[in-house]
Amino acid sequence: MRNKVSVIIPVYNAEKYLEECILSLLNQTLHACEFIFVNDGSSDNSRFLIERYKKKDGRIKLINQENQGVSAARNAGLRVASGEYVGFVDADDYVKRDMYQTLYAAAVRHGCDVVISNFESELEGSKVITSYSFPSDELLDRAYIIEQIMPYFLKEDDLNSSVNKIYLKRLLDENHVLFPEKVALGEDGLFNMLFFGYAKTMTYLNYSGYYYREVAGSATRSIKEKDYFGKAIEVYQMSPPPIYNDMIPSKSVHQLKSIRLIKSLISYIYIYFKPSKDMSFTRRYSYVKQMIGSSHVKEALPLYWDEMKDSLGRYERFIVSMVRSRSTLGLYCAVAYSRLRNS
């Protein structure tokens, strides 16, 4: 019997949480799955842990390769996947028992190319469910994808992940859709842009079965090490895949990317002005000053304001005014007041 869903799990030194991930997959209520673990050059006990469970359950496949990054690992899994649909899980996350049964049932019910669901994560000790305003449990057609989903990928970053979706394998194969392997950030987003660029139908379920675990340490330390603002500028400057050329006018593309950049900036300002022992206040203050002084921010801000001003609250409006006047002190006071109000 053909596998209904192939789940691909890239693994790199993930032994701390890997067993919980494996068990959450093996306990799926949809039994007709295969679980393709791609050991991407781990130096810990990840490989041996997978091999141990592989002996117990034939649905587990293991690919061992030298470290090449998460995109190359996922692509290695795609090359051997045999399921009707494909899903992705990160090795330090886990899923509900009915995750793939729920998504696959929706895919069959609507006969669609892709199913999107919600996901749960943790922010400052509180559980947060990321959900969307798309119509739930309906068949959404090509026109909806072009008018709503493709612009969404340019404007927002909360739909970019591949882990809260299942994709029709045949459509991936026919259009040679793979993860870009030379991209430091945003590989999931580019993969989704390519796939949805070809997709004719989709379904969204207002259902959360995926649990994302933040393991990188404090948000401030992570953002310092990875320079997310620098990567946000790279995304802003980068042209979307050519598949967008006939869908969205270039002027609209620029505005959508401007909205995304300023939204990212506002979130980074909040993170950097959160008290942290991982980076001195002077360095955090200096970094915010550098961000708001960016020529790209100056260029994007008017386009963001034109589109978003009617939907912004008082806090966001004040933040925008402080960014416009390049007042780092004003931004610090605004964030401190917001944190005090919400404490």
Image (tube, rainbow, N blue to C red):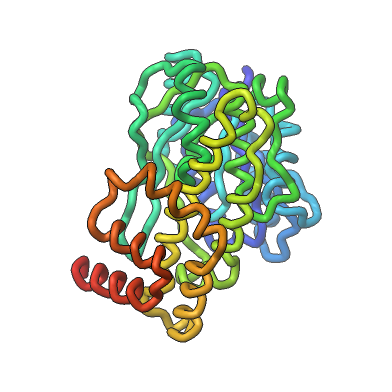
- The answer to whether residue 297 is seen in the rendering is yes
Query: Residue at the spot x=52%, y=40% of the render?
Result: 154
Q: Is residue 52 above or below residue 285?
A: above
Query: Residue at the spot x=56%, y=58% of the render?
Result: 296
Percent of width and height locating residue 301: 45, 54
Q: Is residue 15 above or below residue 306?
A: below
The answer to which of 313 and 79 lies nearer the viewer is 313
Position of the N terminus, as image quadrant, is top right
Judged left or right of residue 189, residue 173 is right
Percent of width and height locating residue 6: 61, 31
Query: Residue at the spot x=19%, y=68% of the render?
Result: 341
The answer to which of 90 and 160 lies nearer the viewer is 160
The answer to which of 232 and 257 lies nearer the viewer is 257
Count all numbered tags in the image, as a single digit: 0
Q: Is residue 222 above or below residue 54?
A: below
Position of the C terminus, as image quadrant, is bottom left
Residue at the limit of the structure toward the right, as seen here? 66
The answer to which of 88 and 43 lies nearer the viewer is 88
- The answer to whether residue 35 is seen in the rendering is no
Percent of width and height locating residue 152: 47, 36
Percent of width and height locating residue 277: 44, 83
Query: Residue at the spot x=56%, y=34% of the render?
Result: 87
Q: Is residue 204 above or below residue 39?
A: above
